[in-house]
Structure formats: C-alpha cells, structure tokens
Amino acid sequence: MDYFLKRKILHLFFPNRCPVCQEIINADDRFCSECTDSLKIYNGSFEISGVDKFCACFEYDDSIKPAVFLIKDGICGNSAHAFGSYLAETIQNNDILHKTDMIVPVPVSVKSMRKRGYNQTELIAETVRAKLGIPVCCAVRKVRETEEQKKLDINGRMSNLKNAFKVCSPEKVKGKNILLIDDVCTTGSTFSEIALVLKESGAGEIFCASVCKTM
Ligand SMILES: [Zn+2]
C-alpha cells in the first residue's frame, strides 16, 4: 500500500502523536509546534574517514532525545515518519540527492532486531524513499555483536566495529553511489566502517545522513 495512504488510514484508528511530548497532532505532522520550535538544526560540518559527504538534521540534545529513545525502545510511534521527513529535506538541501543511486540503512545486530522487532534505520529509510523516490537496499548486515559504542573512546569504537559488517549483496552495490542512513551519529565510526566494506565491494561515492549529530 502507498506510504501516505497507509499513514492516513492508520491515523483514523491510532491518532498521530508528537514523538517527543505525545500530544495528538495532525496525520502529516512530524512534531507538535512547541517541540518543533525547541529542536536545534545542525549546521556543522563533519569529516568522516572514507565518507564523501556527511549531513544531519538536528543537534542531539534533550529536545529530541525522547523521540530517539521511543524509536530505540521498539515503540517507534511517529518517530520514523518525523525523522525520515526531515532527513529527506536535509538530503535535498545537501546536494547529494541527484548523485545517489540507493539508500542503505545502517544495520543493527540480530539481538537488537529481536528486542525491537524492527531496524529503526530501515523505517526511517522507508520514509525517505517515499518522499524522494530513491530505492532502499538492505545490502549490509551486522554479522557479530559489538560492545555499546557509547561506553568506548574513539580508538575503542573503531576496533569494536572491525569486521562487524558484511556486504551481503556485493553485486547490488558495485559501481553505485550509496547513501547510508542512521538515527544518531557520534564519532562517525559506524559510518566509516560500513563505508570501508562498501568500497571494498566496489561501491562508488558514499554519502552519510543521520537524523541527529552529537555535539
Ligand atoms: Zn511535542
């Protein structure tokens, strides 16, 4: 079923809610107006090893944290729609849309997938696909469990992710410019490691877009 039609029908039975404060909002809204006003737009520039361009929508702070926790807790609510809608605009504004052949969502481990019942980055990517028409391909898998990145320093983060990702469909990524999508980017180690395995499989340019960037 069409993405936008599905949302309209769902809204009749489960009214759309602001993913930060849970107030009921219109079917197409992302956040309520008060929460929208408190979000901090990300204006920084950030270099990630092996990545051709990075962009993000918001600074990661207390104003957006509840929506991130919601989607990571397996509830999702309106987070995926709100995040994906903003991300689609950020991608358009960063001059990477016309160069992108496909979106690859950052994969999560089998354990996280079982706990949540979904991969949140796939849901966000699905909204971006509906808005921009770029195909989504889950071409990368996380093949082993890793430590929680937030407990580690920069060197620990890089070694923690070594060989954690595998391209499961190399023929699909060969020669393609790829846009990786994630919910939160901290040091960029995850993007960097996935960019490395994609380039080893013959991918072209790698762009990365995250909903939030920690400051
Ligand atoms: Zn709100």
Image (tube, grey):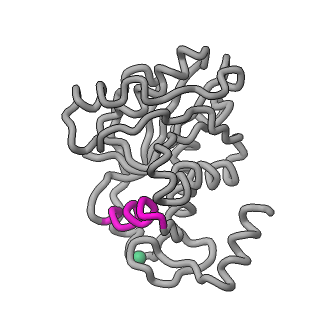
Position above or below: 135 against 168: below
Regarding residue 88, the answer to whether it shows in the image is no
Per the image, is 65 magenta? yes
Image quadrant holding the N terminus, namely: bottom right
Q: Main secondary structure of the magenta part?
A: helix
Front-lying residue, 180 or 96: 180
Position above or below: 20 against 161: below
- Residue 157: give x, y in percent of width and height: 28, 32
The residue sitting at 72% across, 45% down in the picture is 133
Regarding residue 111, the answer to whether it shows in the image is yes
Query: Which quadrant of the figure has residue 27?
Result: bottom right
Tell me how many marks there are.
Answer: 0
- Residue 203: give x, y in percent of width and height: 60, 19
- Residue 56: give x, y in percent of width and height: 42, 44
Position above or below: 72 against 140: below
Position above or below: 61 against 24: above
Per the image, is 16 magenta? no
Magenta segment? 63-74
- For ligand 1, which image quadrant applies? bottom left
The residue sitting at 51% across, 30% down in the picture is 207
